[in-house]
């Protein structure tokens, strides 16, 4: 019980402390201590029986509500100020509407607005808490070394506001815990808004024109979601007299709560950057890598899909659910196709994130027990693998001074450890028998059982994902011009985070039956009375496949034996190497190799245009259906 | 027949059957071109010769990927014939193909690189149709298990004509034959010198050939599934489809990869998805 | 063992041919002659091929290409020179840019005469090459199998032709590295080598397996220093300790020497590594040509 409260409050406290610490050494101590505490806390929570008894809180709820209202108002004023200064009318309007609505709601209803149980912990919350605590913790450790190099070497022109940076990371982490454990929708809303604010401040960290612009876009879109959230709370109270999340989910009259559910799904869609709101996530890639990893792939955007999955039992089988599923499906296909066309590594990862979240939203929209099981599985595996990839890209960006995939050629020679971990991460994203593949398999099964026509999205999207991941993997392996080995690839925090995540990718896959039976299936059972699993035989086969793949590194013991090394075939025109050849007029030419980006077939602009149009129409239809 | 026996039979017989199929392939192609053609056992002679040749490489680790490609190709076929989950079989095949592509990337030569990129485009082209085939079979038989699909009482092709035709279309890509032999043509045709397999020699090249044999048997086995309730018809159709693939190979010239991708996706969307749409409406 | 005779894969290169012989070669693939019934496939890729079919005489441009392709062919391999130009330069043999037939660059196994060579003759040449190929394969397998019975003996003057042939084959790879076949080792003639044998202080060693010489080394002593050189091993048998053993044996051949000196090219990584493993250290470099700098290594007798 106190564990839950501690998990929410300790990161907040740490954040506030970090705001005041300028020098690096005490900062390191605070970060390490907090991460260790949080990590142990989440693991302890996962071992505790659930649902945890949280009906009696040791704090006076009245005062907490009041404090939250004050924080709410303060944040809204700050955002208003930001909106006015940036002359962004949308932000101003949205904040006024949202803050006005919530303040009126809380003051007008007064003490009647209370939740019977403000906090709630079930297995799904435990899963999200583990992700936030362990993966998020790893990122914070990584950020220590990363930000030092960021300011001292790579980006010396960016003003050093590290106290604010780290403070925001931890405040965000606390807000995430609050979001995960909250049952009182008003509390959830506050934590939701805190994450929006953290995201805005962190995206704009570099303080360049582009960063500020993208931060404002992110703010506007998330505020739209926040407004929907606020309307949902008010409507729910009007109709059912309750502001509890569990009450909404377990409500006997589904039609009554359909509109609040649709509104919450809308909020989730904006937060997880589904179409038509994907541009804020793509723009957020200007932020330093820990931000991209923490907020924009592993944790914050997961809050969005977490909410959608929570809504799944309510919207299952309805037309609203179908619309949500379609939005998810369209995002998956468009995101995957768009990822093929770009060579900026972080942009590829962003598109991939958007696409995979689309799959989770698809699962939420379908809402059957199979789909929810698949969706939770996707969340777990995606968080781990994507985080690993972002962190690796961050390290590579610092060492190579480039984010372009084309410049990562031959990385297996110049940065072998990071390169291997990137390969593990990428394999974890789409390859059998790793986690994401298991999840995609589960999604496919859920889809064919529920509504087979939706499978068209998965089928086309997943073939696109194959292309851009393997293209990238190949780029790392090919050694056209030999590079020098980079001396020190990783420092301690970075190394722990990366090695830990790589191990987690493997372990999560090997231990997947355990994760499924201990964490996911109980949750699905509790909501639906049924659960899905993958079948004993299949699990054995996948273990065999994993074992086969793990044999691969062993072949390197036989490296170079029994073969004769020669040059690549360049039509016989080699000039003593595989990369130089005699061109016309006796000139020496170098071999250059570049990837296909299929610009003539899928252009980003065309894809966005159709994606945004299509998804806007779908969302409009969704609201109409919910109102009717 | 117990799955274990089927598995063993596959492991032992598939390379022989696959090699004979490859031999017949070259012979029939030659006859279509008014030539005599090599002896039926030619592929075996080729592999035996390659096995005794020196292994020349560009990068010292490139051959390991091919070895795993062979291993996983055998694994895929073994899974299929032992009767396990069809989706898992597809994913294992993708895994095998990816090892092949990574090996070509590792070889770090311009021809093998472009061959690898084209191979990826080909994989992207046929993947939707392959998945839709599995989904189609699930919708008719309510199971993904190859055992149960094979044991289904009705002739699957009657319920899945669109899927069958779509599958035939992408079979041309999987067999690496014109008009879609863009990454590395089977036997003598050249594209990008030898495309994907340019930098491999000796035993590694032999392994690639053997993997192709295993894969051919697996693909024809999948055709058999469409006719599984009448086994004799199934085997006859598999062989007929094989001859059809060779005929198309000899009649058509190679198309561009843009055409390959667009047409394969169009076929998947219209024939494959269309079939599934009709099935779900009829339910 | 079956294999080579039934499955000869060729790579065809036109050195500077008028295309007459090329057309005849490609005609062999047409339905009229149909060499595919013999299992012949025209792979465009040296790494897949066994037989190197060359047409046309060798000029400056094609010289390097021929060498590149030849080097990329895996063993065992045969070379067929098709047509008069490939055999000896044909009617172009006295042109300013023609250095001669294919055998002025790489060793040729079969010559198919004609101008243009007829398809029947070409097919006959291929069939003969198959016999050569099989013979080479058998030799190599039997040699490879009896490597443990290698004998390290003093060489006689009568071994000079075999050692010279081995020298030219072995130094091909060095020429590859530097792109320069003006290496002294490749330019040495039989007379020069025989003169060396006549010098009393020169010691020649040979490695013999099944009666074939697959390795050699030589050295001579001046006062306290022994100068070693030309440590050669047949390319097919490298990496099995023969070179190391040759160095050890030739060191033993100079019991009174207190210092050993040897030289190799600056980009011959393998040789440098090998010598360093055996206790040699670099002490001097000396440019020889723009492409090659000699690196001198020495070792004190312990």
Image: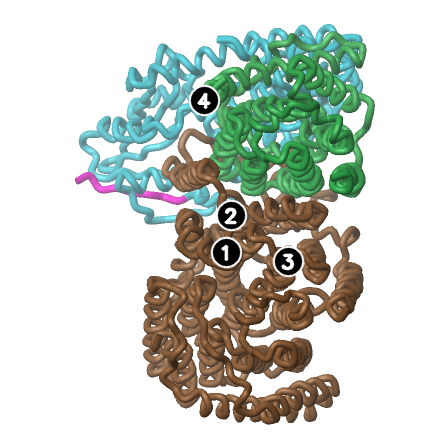
Instruction: Identify the secondary structure beneath mark 4.
Output: helix
- The answer to whether residue A90 is left or right of residue A30 is right
User: How many residues crowd around disc 3 within 10 Å: few (fewer than 14), some, or many (20 or more)?
Assistant: many
Circle 4 chain: B
**Mark toward the viewer: 4 or 2:** 2
- Chain coloured green here: B
What residue lies at 53% left-to-right and 53% top-to-bottom?
Answer: A373
Instruction: Identify the secondary structure beneath mark 2.
Output: loop
Disc 4 versus disc 3: distance between alpha carbons?
42 Å
Query: What residue is disc 3 on?
Result: A316
Does the residue at mark 4 contact the one at mark 3 (Cβ under 8 Å)?
A: no
- Chain coloured cyan here: C
Query: What residue is disc 1 on?
Result: A524
Q: Are the residues under badges 4 and 1 in a single subunit?
A: no
- The answer to whether residue B182 is left or right of residue C196 is right
Q: Position of residue A316 (x, y in %)?
A: 64, 58
Give the mark, 1 or 3, whose residue is nearer the N terminus: 3
Give the mark, 2 or 3, whose residue is nearer the N terminus: 3
Q: Which corner quadrant of the image does residue C99 belong to?
A: top right
Residue A335 in view (yes/no): no
**Mark toward the viewer: 4 or 3:** 3
Does the residue at mark 4 contact the one at mark 2 (Cβ under 8 Å)?
A: no
Q: Which mark is residue B4?
A: 4
- Chain coloured brown here: A
């Amino acid at each position: 019980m106190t564990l839950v409260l501690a998990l929410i409050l300790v990161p907040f406290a740490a954040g506030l402390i970090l705001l005041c610490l300028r020098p690096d050494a005490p900062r390191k101590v605070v970060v390490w201590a907090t991460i260790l505490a949080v990590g142990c806390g989440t693991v302890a929570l996962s071992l505790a029986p659930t649902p945890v008894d949280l009906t009696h809180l040791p704090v006076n709820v009245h005062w907490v509500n009041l404090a939250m209202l004050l924080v709410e108002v303060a944040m809204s004023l700050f955002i208003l100020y930001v909106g006015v200064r940036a002359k962004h009318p949308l932000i101003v309007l949205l904040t006024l509407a949202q803050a006005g609505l919530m303040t009126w709601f809380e003051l007008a209803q007064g003490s009647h607005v209370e939740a019977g149980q403000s906090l709630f912990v079930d297995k799904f919350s435990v899963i999200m808490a583990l992700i936030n605590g362990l993966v998020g913790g790893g990122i914070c450790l990584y950020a220590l070394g990363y930000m030092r190099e960021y300011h001292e070497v790579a980006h010396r022109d960016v003003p050093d506001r590290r106290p604010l940076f780290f403070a925001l990371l931890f405040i965000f982490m606390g807000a995430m815990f609050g979001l995960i454990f909250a049952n009182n929708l008003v509390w959830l809303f506050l934590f939701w808004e805190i994450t929006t604010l953290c995201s805005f401040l962190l995206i704009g960290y570099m303080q360049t024109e582009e960063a500020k612009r993208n931060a404002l876009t992110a703010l506007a879109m998330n505020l739209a979601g926040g407004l929907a959230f606020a309307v949902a709370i008010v409507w729910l109270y009007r109709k059912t007299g309750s502001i509890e999340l569990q009450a909404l989910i377990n409500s006997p009259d589904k039609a009554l709560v359909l509109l609040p559910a649709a509104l919450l799904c809308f909020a989730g869609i904006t937060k997880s950057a589904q179409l038509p709101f994907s541009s804020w996530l793509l723009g957020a890639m200007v932020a330093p890598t820990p931000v991209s990893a923490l907020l924009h792939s592993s944790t914050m955007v997961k809050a969005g899909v977490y909410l959608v999955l929570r809504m799944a039992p309510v919207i299952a089988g309805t037309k609203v659910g179908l619309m949500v599923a379609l939005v998810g499906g369209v995002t998956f296909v468009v995101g995957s196709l768009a990822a093929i066309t770009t060579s900026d590594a972080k942009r590829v990862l962003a598109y991939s994130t958007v696409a995979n979240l689309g799959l989770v939203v698809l699962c939420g929209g379908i809402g059957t027990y199979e789909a929810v099981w698949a969706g939770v599985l996707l969340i777990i595996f995606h968080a781990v693998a994507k985080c690993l990839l972002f962190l690796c890209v961050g390290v590579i960006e610092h060492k190579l001074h480039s984010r372009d995939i084309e410049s990562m050629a031959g990385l297996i020679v110049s940065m072998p450890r990071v390169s291997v971990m990137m390969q593990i991460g990428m394999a974890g994203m789409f390859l059998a028998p790793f986690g994401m593949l298991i999840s995609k398999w589960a999604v496919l099964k859920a889809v064919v059982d529920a509504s087979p026509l939706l499978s068209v999205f998965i089928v086309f999207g997943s073939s696109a994902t194959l292309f851009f991941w393997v293209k990238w993997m190949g780029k790392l392996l090919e050694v056209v011009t030999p590079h020098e080995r980079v001396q020190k690839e990783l420092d301690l925090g970075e190394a722990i985070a990366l090695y830990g995540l790589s191990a987690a990718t493997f372990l999560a896959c090997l231990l997947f039956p355990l994760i499924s039976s201990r964490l996911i299936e109980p949750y699905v059972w509790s909501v639906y009375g049924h659960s899905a699993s993958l079948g004993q035989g299949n699990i054995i086969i996948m273990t065999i496949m994993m074992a086969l793949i793990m044999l691969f590194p062993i072949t390197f013991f036989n490296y170079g034996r029994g073969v004769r090394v020669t040059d690549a075939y360049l039509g016989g025109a080699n000039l003593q190497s595989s990369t130089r050849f005699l061109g016309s007029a006796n000139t020496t030419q170098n071999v250059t190799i570049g990837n296909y980006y299929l610009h003539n077939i899928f252009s980003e602009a065309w894809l966005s245009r159709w994606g945004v149009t299509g998804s806007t129409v779908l969302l409009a239809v969704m609201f109409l259906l919910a109102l009717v | 027949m117990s799955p274990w026996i089927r598995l063993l039979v596959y492991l032992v017989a598939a390379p022989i059957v696959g090699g004979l199929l490859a031999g017949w392939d070259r012979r029939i192609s030659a006859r279509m071109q008014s030539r005599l053609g090599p002896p039926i056992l030619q592929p075996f002679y080729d592999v035996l010769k390659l096995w005794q040749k020196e292994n020349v490489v560009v990068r010292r680790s490139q051959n390991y990927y091919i070895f795993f490609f062979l291993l996983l190709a055998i694994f895929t076929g073994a899974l299929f014939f032992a009767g396990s989950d069809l989706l898992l079989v597809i994913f294992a095949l993708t895994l095998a193909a990816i090892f092949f592509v990574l090996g070509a990337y590792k070889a770090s030569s311009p021809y093998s690189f472009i061959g690898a990129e084209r191979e990826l485009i080909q994989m992207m082209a046929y993947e939707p149709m392959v998945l839709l085939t599995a989904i189609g079979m699930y919708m008719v038989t309510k199971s993904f298990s190859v055992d149960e699909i094979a044991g289904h009482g009705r002739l699957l092709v009657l319920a899945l004509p669109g899927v069958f035709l779509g599958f035939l279309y992408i079979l041309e890509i999987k067999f690496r034959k014109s008009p879609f032999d863009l990454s590395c043509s089977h036997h003598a045709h050249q594209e990008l010198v030898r495309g994907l397999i340019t930098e491999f020699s000796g035993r590694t090249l032999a392994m690639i050939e053997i993997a192709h044999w295993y894969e051919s048997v697996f693909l024809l086995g999948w055709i058999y599934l469409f006719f599984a309730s009448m086994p004799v018809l199934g085997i006859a159709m598999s062989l007929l489809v094989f001859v059809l693939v060779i005929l198309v190979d000899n009649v058509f010239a190679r198309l561009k990869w843009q055409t390959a991708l667009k047409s394969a996706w169009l076929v998947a969307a219209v024939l494959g998805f269309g079939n599934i749409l009709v099935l779900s409406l009829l339910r | 063992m079956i294999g080579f005779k039934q499955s000869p894969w060729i790579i065809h290169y036109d050195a500077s041919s008028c295309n007459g012989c090329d057309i005849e070669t490609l005609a062999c693939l047409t339905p009229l002659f149909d060499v595919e019934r013999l299992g012949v496939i025209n792979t465009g890729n040296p790494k897949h091929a066994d037989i190197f079919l060359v047409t046309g005489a060798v000029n400056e441009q094609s010289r390097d290409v021929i060498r590149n392709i030849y080097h990329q062919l895996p063993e065992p391999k045969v070379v067929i020179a098709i047509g008069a130009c490939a055999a000896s330069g044909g009617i172009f043999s006295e042109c300013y840019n023609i250095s001669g037939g294919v055998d002025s660059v790489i060793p040729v196994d079969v010559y198919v005469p004609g101008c243009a060579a007829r398809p029947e003759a070409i097919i006959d040449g291929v069939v003969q090459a198959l016999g050569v190929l099989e013979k080479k394969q058998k030799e190599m397998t039997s040699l490879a199998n009896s490597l443990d019975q290698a004998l390290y003996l003093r060489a006689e003057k009568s071994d000079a032709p075999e050692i010279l042939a081995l020298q030219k084959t072995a130094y091909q790879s060095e020429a590859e590295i530097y792109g320069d076949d003006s290496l002294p080792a490749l330019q040495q003639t039989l007379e020069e080598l025989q003169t060396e044998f006549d010098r009393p202080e020169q010691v020649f060693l040979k490695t013999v397996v099944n009666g074939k010489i697959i390795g050699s080394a030589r050295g001579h002593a001046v006062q306290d220093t022994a100068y070693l050189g030309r440590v050669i091993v047949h390319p097919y048998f490298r990496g099995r300790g023969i070179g190391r053993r040759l160095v050890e044996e030739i060191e033993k051949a100079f019991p009174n020497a207190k210092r050993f000196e040897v030289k190799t090219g600056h980009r011959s990584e393998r040789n440098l590594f090998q010598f360093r493993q055996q206790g040699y250290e670099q002490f001097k470099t000396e440019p020889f040509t723009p492409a090659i700098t000699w690196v001198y290594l020495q070792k004190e007798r312990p």
